[in-house]
């Protein structure tokens, strides 16, 4: 039945109701009158516009009476099992009719009771109570949703602004609701030590467990159950959203899938990201590529594996690899970082308009001074950075097979100022914590090992490989500048107290319309590497840095 995102009984909101039976419309909310099934009178602030020979068209803000009447028309028809009539009360009758009609046939929902709340302007909240009934199985449902009433431009008529989320907040436009035997049996996911992984214990793993079920459910030895679920449409599938189980009427028999996750590191990762909003982190083992932990503050989308964000100055690790291999610079070489640098009509600035007049490249790397990297652009071809990312770090090839859906990074070929911006992780470069943890891991081990969550031996899949390995000399230079950054540079505060073989890099990625940059941090210590991002958090050393450093210390 396609991809699915399992949401266990932990969610209070459940699935939408399908129309069936004649149930009186329940009206709730302080100050809300009984909805009448007729057009309300015009309020004093309503206006009309007309031209000679044409019917007057209402314009201006909607009155409270118009909002009540439009809402009642829609909710009553929906509740009483008249989908065509309910759809006609929206501004997209065709899409609304298709989804509303499908409730009774596909979602098997009945006994619908709709309770409107107090309108907030033109937005009307409401609750739904219903019963999902399939063969001899049934369960009650309850959830909340809302819609907005708008005025149709052509005739001024108040209508419900239609989106699939009106029916249930988990529906995206193009998605549908289906009740029946799930196409994919459930799975019992295990950590590397054999313990069970559940979303109740590890909330961040909800999307991961969904992906594991989609990938391995049919081959792990389980039997499908019966459930009400969101079946994703083309747009949602393109966005890599999995199908989502809303209600389980009968449990299937799960198959077993063992992962590489460390229970200790996973628990620590969940605890760390809980300290910040919009935070994501990944921990990997450099020598093998095993993913040891993954966690996100928000549990609706797996930014850690599937995010596509500018990585900021953490990308300077890849850029430095290229510069060292081309022998354009060495860590100790004198290399000033000017306050501004002009390239192809753009003027680039350092953070805080800082500069390093008489310093080494290592100092510029440690201070994350942008123009010490951008001023190499005239000596590079447009494709150099792209080739370096692909050939040494295995990035941007769209061929990682980690066991669940992932985004493998993107370093497009760019020219002019955009190419210069790419050298510092801006422009068109896009990464996520999984990608940047892999970058740090590649430096730590000296070779790219594709990250994976499930051993390739389970399904005999082929892991991605890099075309070549960096030289020992280049690895030594990278460790030199990353160790300097961890000891004396922008990562020093987060990495304080670290011992052994370690190194780090911070990053701050500017985002249009966002007051604070996304804060990035990637580091390695021995046979552990990790990367994290805190969106709109500020500088990486202050935001993602403590998260990553704590996990490296936890892991040894």
Image (cartoon, rainbow, N blue to C red):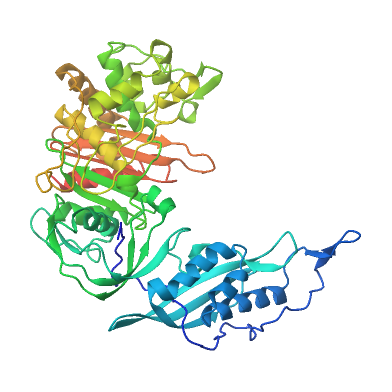
Q: Is residue 91 left or right of residue 231?
A: right
> How far across and how far down the image is residue 216, in percent?
18, 55
Residue at 54% of width from left, 43% of height from top? 513
Q: Position of residue 13 (x, y in %)?
A: 39, 72
Quadrant containing the C terminus is top left
Compare residues 232 and 7 and report the one nearer the observer. Answer: 232
Residue closer to the observer: 312 or 198? 198
**Residue 457, placed above or below residue 375:** below
Q: Residue at x 44, y 81 (%)?
A: 129
Q: Is residue 10 visible?
A: no
Image-quadrant location for residue 25: bottom right
Residue appearing at x 42%, y 19% in the figure: 374
Residue 536 coordinates in the image, percent (x, y): 44, 46
Tell me: 480 left or right of 433.
left
Q: Would residue 497 be found to the left or right of residue 14 on screen?
A: left
Q: Is residue 264 visible?
A: yes
| Residue 538, image x, y percentages | 43, 42
Work out whether 385 lies above or below 34: above
Placement of 164 over or under 491, stated as above or below = below
Q: Quadrant location of the N terminus? A: bottom left
């Amino acid at each position: 039945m396609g991809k699915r995102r399992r949401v266990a009984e932990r969610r209070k909101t459940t699935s939408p109701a399908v129309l069936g039976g004649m149930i009186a419309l329940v009206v709730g909310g302080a100050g809300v009158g009984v909805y009448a099934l007729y057009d309300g009178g015009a309020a004093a602030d309503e206006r009309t516009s007309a031209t000679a020979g044409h019917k007057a068209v209402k314009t201006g803000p909607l009155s409270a009476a118009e909002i009540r009447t439009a809402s009642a028309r829609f909710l009553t028809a929906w509740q009483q099992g008249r989908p065509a009539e309910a759809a006609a009360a929206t501004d997209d009758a065709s899409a609304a009719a298709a989804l509303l009609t499908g409730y009774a046939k596909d979602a098997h929902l009945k006994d619908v009771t709709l309770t409107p709340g107090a309108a907030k302007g033109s937005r009307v909240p409401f609750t739904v109570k219903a019963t999902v009934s399939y063969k001899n199985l049934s369960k009650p449902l309850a959830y909340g949703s809302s819609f907005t009433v708008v005025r149709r431009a052509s005739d001024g008529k108040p209508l419900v602004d239609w989106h699939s989320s009106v029916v249930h907040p988990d529906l995206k436009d193009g998605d549908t609701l289906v009740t029946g035997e799930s196409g994919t049996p459930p799975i019992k996911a295990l950590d590397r030590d054999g313990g069970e992984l559940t979303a109740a214990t590890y909330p961040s793993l909800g999307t991961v467990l969904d992906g594991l079920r989609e990938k391995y459910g049919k081959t792990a030895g389980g039997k499908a159950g019966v459930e009400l679920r969101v079946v994703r449409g083309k747009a949602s599938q393109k966005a890599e959203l999995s199908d989502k189980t809303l209600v389980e009427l009968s449990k299937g028999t799960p198959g077993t899938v063992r992962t590489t996750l460390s229970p200790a590191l996973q628990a620590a990762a969940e605890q760390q990201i809980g300290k910040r909003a919009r935070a994501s982190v990944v921990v990997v083992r450099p020598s093998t590529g095993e993913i040891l932990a993954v966690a996100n503050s928000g549990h609706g989308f797996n930014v850690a594996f599937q995010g596509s964000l500018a990585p900021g100055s953490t990308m300077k690790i890849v850029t430095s690899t290229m510069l060292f291999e081309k022998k354009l610079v060495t860590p100790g070489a004198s290399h000033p970082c000017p306050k501004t640098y002009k390239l192809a009509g753009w003027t680039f600035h350092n953070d805080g308009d800082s500069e390093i007049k008489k310093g080494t490249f290592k100092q510029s790397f440690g201070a994350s001074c942008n123009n010490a990297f951008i001023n190499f652009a005239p000596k590079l071809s447009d494709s150099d950075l792209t080739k370096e990312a692909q050939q040494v770090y295995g990035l941007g090839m769209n061929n990682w097979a980690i066991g669940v859906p992932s985004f493998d990074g993107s370093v497009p070929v760019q020219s002019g100022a955009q190419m210069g911006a790419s050298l510092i992780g801006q422009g068109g470069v896009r990464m996520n914590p999984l990608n940047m943890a892999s970058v740090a891991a590649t430096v730590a081990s000296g070779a790219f090992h594709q990250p994976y969550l499930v051993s390739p031996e389970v399904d005999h899949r082929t892991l991605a490989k890099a075309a070549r390995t960096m030289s020992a000399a280049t690895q030594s230079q990278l460790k030199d500048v990353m160790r300097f950054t961890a000891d004396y540079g922008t990562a020093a505060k987060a990495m304080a107290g670290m011992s052994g073989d370690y190194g780090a890099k911070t990053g701050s990625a500017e985002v249009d319309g966002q007051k604070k940059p996304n804060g990035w941090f990637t580091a390695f210590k021995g046979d552990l590497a990790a990367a994290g991002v805190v969106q709109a958090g500020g500088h990486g050393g202050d935001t993602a840095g403590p998260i990553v450093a704590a996990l490296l210390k936890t892991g040894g």
